[in-house]
Amino acid sequence: MRLRPEIVALPAYAQGKSAAADAYKLSSNENPFDPLPGVVQAMQTATDFNRYPDASARALREALAARFGVSVDEVHIGSGSVALISQLLLAAAGPGDEVVYAWRSFEAYPSLVTVSGATSITVPNRPDFGHDLPAMAAAITDRTRVVIVCTPNNPTSTIVTAEEFDAFMAEVPRDLLVILDEAYVEFVTDPRAVNGKTLLGKYPNLVILRTFSKAYGLAGLRVGYAIGPASILNAARSTAIPLSVTAVASVAALASLEAEPELLARVAQLAERRDAAWRSLRVQGWNVPRPQGNFLWLPTGTQTIEVAEKLGEAGLVVRPFPPDGIRVSIGEEEAVEILLRNTAEIVRTLPTSHLARQLG
Ligand SMILES: Cc1ncc(COP(=O)(O)O)c(C=O)c1O
């Protein structure tokens, strides 16, 4: 069978491991709270699924357009923001083109770029685990078609500041698409962080991506959105698999927007839990970058698998990214307590010269 060799060589998407009944799943940056009853009720009213959904998810686009102060054409809905990344890459990049992004970053980027036919150009994160935007700007060539900036960055949980982002955009050609992936933006508490909402209309080449999967707790329904210039989003619409956003997902997203105060109160609770966990880890002697997503980064380096296994034995399913580190989602309160009980001991087993112990 003649298949595309670069596709055959791709590893399948590695999902965060599921947890046994007595373990906590901290491997997929999910929201640990159960769905809100009001959202479930709204979904139960969307029962005409003998019909296809509205292909453009118009009602949800209208609600988001009003919220962001943009036109309906400047909003595009996808079955998860990962679908939107794929569509934008397909729209802008193909064989012979390059896509620049930081590494480590979201683990789906490399394969989505390969599927588009383009080549990934990865720029190592700074020693403090944040994006090196000047180096990313320097990596742009006349073959570059897309740059992806992820803030807070999955998996290091670091932010790009507004100042850094503006300085970066000043370096980027105006006909080069920049995707600002803000899947975790609702968890950000650092006032210095860039927020795509404040940049809408400022750059003709900027698209921001957000999702209902994380803060709004709808990961299983698959719904995310892009906001940006209509001409770019129209191109993304042309590459989309038609009708992939289900009616029930749209209804749940609309109900979640209505229930936003309640959902954001949960987000604030998770952010507080995260900050408390980060402070405790620092006291224990861990070098953990200040987290701004709903997850923490332990730079365990070559000990990554070993530490992830120890946490697994303690009942925590975390996400190892060997040979760099471990991403731990902020889940239930008890899960964080178990984490901290175990990290206190684990840190002492690491050599004092280990990156995970060199407090930055
Ligand atoms: C940085 C980042 N972007 C996008 C996504 C995709 O989220 P979804 O497709 O569920 O909207 C994720 C999910 O983990 C992510 O971490």
Image (cartoon, grey):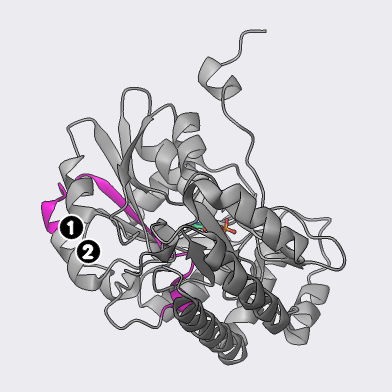
Residue placed under numbered mark 1 in the picture:
169
**Magenta highlight range:** 168-188
Question: Mark 2–mark 1 contact, CB under 8 Å?
Answer: yes
For the point 81% across and 76% down, which residue is it?
Answer: 45
Q: Residues within 10 Å of mark 2 (few under 14, many from 20)?
A: some
> Residue 121's spot in the image, x, y percent?
32, 36
Picture quadrant of residue 18? bottom right
Amino acid type at mark 1: Met
Amino acid type at mark 2: Phe
> Residue 110's spot in the image, x, y percent?
46, 38
Residue placed under numbered mark 2 in the picture:
165
Q: Residues within 10 Å of mark 1 (few under 14, many from 20)?
A: some
Q: As drawn, which residue projects farthest toward the top?
A: 1
Q: Nearer the viewer, residue 153 or 291?
A: 291
Q: Looking at the image, is 122 positioned above or below residue 288? A: above
Q: Nearer the viewer, residue 321 or 110?
A: 321
